[in-house]
Amino acid sequence: SVTICDGAVGTTCLLSYPSGHGEGVQTSYSYDSVNSNWIIADRGYSVVSTIPDGGGTVNSYEILNNNLDSFVFRRDGADEYIYYCATNGLLFKRNIQTDRMAEI
């Protein structure tokens, strides 16, 4: 499996940034206000990671079934979802708690 800086301190970990900011692929990100985490993923990969707001340790959060082009994190009650567009152009919904995925 591929991880994005798993366990590394965010201030020294080599993360990619949106286009025009440094080297590497474009990073998508979404904010989880309940856990005060940034949820991040590099375009073209299937690993979604978290980093605490303000910096800290980057941890793998979820491994998707497909490489993603972009994503958004949503919360519905206690359930957490990742909606993402895969690099094959299809749209998916992943429930983190149940590990269920559906093409939309």
Image (cartoon, grey):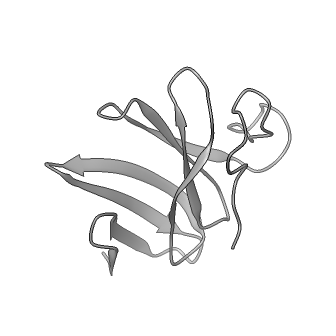
The residue sitting at 67% across, 64% down in the picture is 44
Which image quadrant: the N terminus? bottom right
Report the label total.
0
Whole-percent x, y for residue 42 in the image: 66, 53
Whole-percent x, y for residue 92 in the image: 38, 71
User: Quarter-wise, where is residue 34 in the image?
Assistant: top left
Q: Nearer the viewer, residue 66 or 53?
A: 53
User: Quarter-wise, where is residue 80 in the image?
Assistant: bottom left
Whole-percent x, y for residue 7 in the image: 68, 46
Question: Is 39 above or below relative to 62?
Answer: above
| Residue at the outermost top position | 54
Whole-percent x, y for residue 14 in the image: 80, 40
In the shown orientation, is residue 37 left or right of residue 23?
left
In the shown orientation, is residue 97 left or right of residue 39?
left
| Residue at the outermost right position | 23
Question: Is 88 above or below relative to 4?
Answer: below
The residue sitting at 55% across, 76% down in the picture is 66
The residue sitting at 30% across, 75% down in the picture is 104
In the shown orientation, is residue 5 left or right of residue 35?
right
User: Quarter-wise, where is residue 36 in the image?
Assistant: top left
The residue sitting at 31% across, 58% down in the picture is 81
Q: Nearer the viewer, residue 20 or 39?
A: 39
Q: Nearer the viewer, residue 93 or 59?
A: 59
